């Protein structure tokens, strides 16, 4: 594949060659972009730095600064006059130069997202914050005694008495009844805002601003549903047999509370697998550094700016941030030498190399991942390695016997994990789509119809409660959940392509990627460099020869 700088040059040259200098509209757009970039470049960098500082200090004044700066950036994008200009140029169809047209698309969507009427936006933010607060302060009760989310989780993991499990599950759903009416009001407000901007509802509006459309997603999810139907039934039947024995009930009597989390979105740990023992005497930072260097994507400059270990007040999770789209990319972690942090550092560095290896010739507005889910895909692609027996053997210098130990159950878990998540994500995607299409319908029944259809778990007899509302994502990350699944699909599609077309192997049985520079080269050239120069599906097609498809996810995890 051509490097992107050549591509940019060629696109520019073709304009010159055909003698069509930029038309008036293009020229106007170009100066608009220059002025815009000049303005936001500085503001965004300031906001990113403030956010980084706040994550490390945990001080509320630092967080206040972040809100203030983020608001300033938003204000730029909410300007109705500037949006009208972009809309005009877009509708005139006169932005012919491919790069310019792409910049226009990206810019147009960023403005469109922020065109919600200020009064309405205020109501949405206030109500959203109120619901979020109710979520974080509410405690469910078991026999009148308050329990925390962690206590509920513990019971669902370890308790063998069905009655107690049911009580814990019911406690996890109590918050639903508290917030459901507010969530429906919030959905209606969001719909109102979307309709004012010419969309059917907020779901279609959100997808459009994210360059996704409902039909395309429906197609992908339908295919995934069909391809996973039988394998999931099989896998779940095995799991159910184990669970039924464990809880001493008939398989027929298994209910949602017999799985290990309130939504059956995670893998019940029913087979013995403890990978931490292999990592506890290793330095996972060193492992990650060595691995990325070996595939030709050195991460030392990223790690040098990063903050990797626990500290008082610091954000306890992990993330990656591109501070300036000029190479200052950092990750935040709270490393411990165990499997979960191994996965996390590989994951965050996946995001980081994507950002780090954009071609700097690409215009600022396009110097970012093709889509939020494509960067998630790269992160998942690398994160998955922490449990890969071949990778573990090479990186941790394990014996064949140790590898065989891991292989006995790790494949099974990977399969369970991915299929359980896929079926759960289908519930979220389809429910949310219908929630916005008609918030007046019987949502309690709709939810259970989805759970029965996709997760094969029965609605408890007579149950008519807003169990769906206990999922915080409808409030804090609306119309986003499908992206997790798309990320997994793309991670598998890239894996398949690299194994067969880049490494020229027959199967992925022994693939660890360790020391294979071709892998880093392929990803840099075909995914990272171009940033958002192409629409995400165009990028995927260029990189793998096909648009996004669930085929390879199924090939990898359905054995
Ligand atoms: Zn991520």
Image: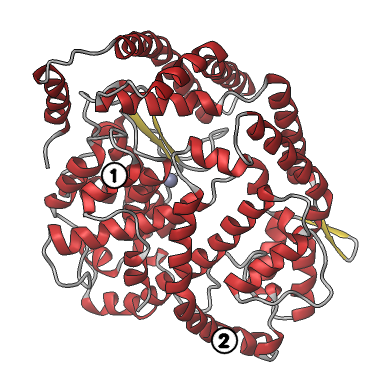
Other residues around mark 2 within 10 Å, as few (<14) / some (14–19) / many (≥20):
some
Give the side of residue 521 with respect to residue 62, left or right: left
| Nearer the observer, 473 or 310 | 473
Tell whether 355 sits left or right of 341: left
Q: Is residue 70 above or below residue 133?
A: above
Instruction: Give 385 or 215, whichever is nearer the viewer.
Output: 215
Q: Which quadrant is home to the N terminus?
A: top left
Q: Earlier in the sequence, mark 2 or mark 1?
A: 2
Question: For the view shown, which residue lies furthest in the front direction?
Answer: 92
- For label 2, the residue is 242
**Residue 94 visible within the image:** yes
Nearer mark to the viewer, of 2 and 1: 1
Badge number at residue 344: none
Residue 314 lies left or right of residue 177; in this view the side is left
Residue sitting at x 49%, y 57%: 218
**Residue positioned 53% across, 26% down in the render:** 112
Q: Quadrant of residue 304?
A: top left
Q: Secondary structure at mark 1?
A: helix
- Kindly identify the residue that appears in the image at 18 percent across and 45 percent down: 293
Q: Position of residue 65 (x, y in %)?
A: 58, 17
Residue in view at x 87 percent, y 60 percent: 145
Identify the colour scheme used: secondary structure
* Mark count: 2
Q: Which mark is residue 538?
A: 1
Q: Is residue 454 above or below residue 211?
A: below
Label 2 to label 1: alpha-carbon separation? 44 Å
């Amino acid at each position: 594949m051509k490097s992107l700088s050549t591509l940019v040059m060629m696109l520019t040259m073709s304009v010159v060659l055909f003698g069509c200098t930029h038309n008036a509209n293009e020229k106007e757009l170009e100066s608009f972009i220059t002025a815009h970039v000049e303005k936001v470049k500085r503001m965004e960098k300031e906001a990113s730095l403030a956010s980084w500082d706040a994550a490390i200090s945990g001080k509320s004044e630092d967080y206040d600064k972040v809100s203030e700066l983020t608001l300033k950036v938003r204000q730029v994008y909410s300007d109705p006059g500037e949006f009208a200009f972009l809309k005009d140029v877009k509708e005139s169809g006169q932005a012919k130069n491919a790069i310019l047209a792409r910049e226009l698309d990206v810019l147009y969507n960023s403005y469109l997202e922020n065109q919600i009427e200020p009064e309405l936006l205020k109501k949405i933010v206030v109500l959203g914050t109120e619901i979020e607060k109710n979520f974080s302060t509410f405690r469910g009760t078991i026999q009148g005694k308050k329990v925390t989310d962690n206590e509920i989780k513990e019971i669902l993991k370890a308790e063998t008495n069905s009655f107690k499990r049911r009580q814990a599950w019911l406690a996890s759903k109590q918050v639903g009844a508290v917030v459901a009416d507010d969530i429906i009001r919030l959905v209606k407000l969001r719909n109102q805002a979307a309709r004012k901007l010419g969309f059917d509802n907020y779901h279609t509006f959100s997808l459009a601003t994210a360059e996704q459309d409902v039909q395309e997603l429906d197609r992908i999810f339908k295919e995934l549903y069909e391809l996973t139907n039988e394998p999931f039934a099989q896998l779940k039947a095995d799991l159910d047999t184990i669970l039924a024995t464990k809880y001493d009930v008939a398989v027929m009597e298994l209910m949602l509370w017999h799985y290990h989390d309130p939504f059956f979105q995670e893998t019940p740990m029913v087979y013995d697998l403890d990978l931490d023992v292999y990592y506890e005497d290793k330095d996972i930072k060193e492992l990650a550094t060595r691995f990325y260097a070996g595939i030709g994507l050195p991460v030392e400059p990223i790690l040098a700016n990063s903050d990797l270990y626990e500290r008082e007040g610091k954000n306890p999770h992990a993330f990656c941030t591109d501070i300036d789209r000029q190479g200052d990319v950092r990750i935040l972690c709270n490393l411990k030498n165990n499997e979960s942090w191994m996965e996390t550092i590989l994951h965050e560095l996946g995001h980081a190399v994507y950002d780090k290896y954009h071609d700097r010739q690409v215009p600022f507005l396009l110097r970012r991942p093709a889509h939020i889910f494509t960067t998630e895909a790269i992160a998942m692609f690398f994160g998955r390695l922490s449990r890969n027996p071949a990778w573990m053997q090479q990186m941790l210098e394990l014996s064949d016997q140790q590898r065989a130990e891991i292989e006995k159950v790790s494949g099974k878990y990977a399969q369970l994990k991915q299929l359980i998540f896929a079926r759960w994500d289908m519930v979220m995607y389809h429910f949310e789509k219908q929630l916005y299409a008609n918030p007046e319908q019987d949502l309690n029944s709709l939810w259970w119809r989805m759970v029965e259809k996709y997760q094969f778990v029965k609605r408890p007899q007579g149950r008519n409660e807003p169990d769906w509302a206990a999922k915080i994502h409808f409030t804090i990350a609306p119309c986003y959940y499908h992206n997790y699944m798309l990320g997994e699909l793309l991670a598998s599609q890239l894996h398949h392509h690299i194994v067969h077309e880049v490494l020229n192997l027959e199967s992925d049985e022994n693939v660890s990627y360790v020391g294979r520079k071709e892998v880093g080269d392929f990803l840099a050239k075909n995914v990272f460099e171009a940033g958002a120069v192409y629409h995400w599906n165009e990028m995927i097609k260029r990189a793998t020869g096909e648009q996004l498809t669930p085929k390879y996810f199924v090939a990898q995890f359905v054995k």
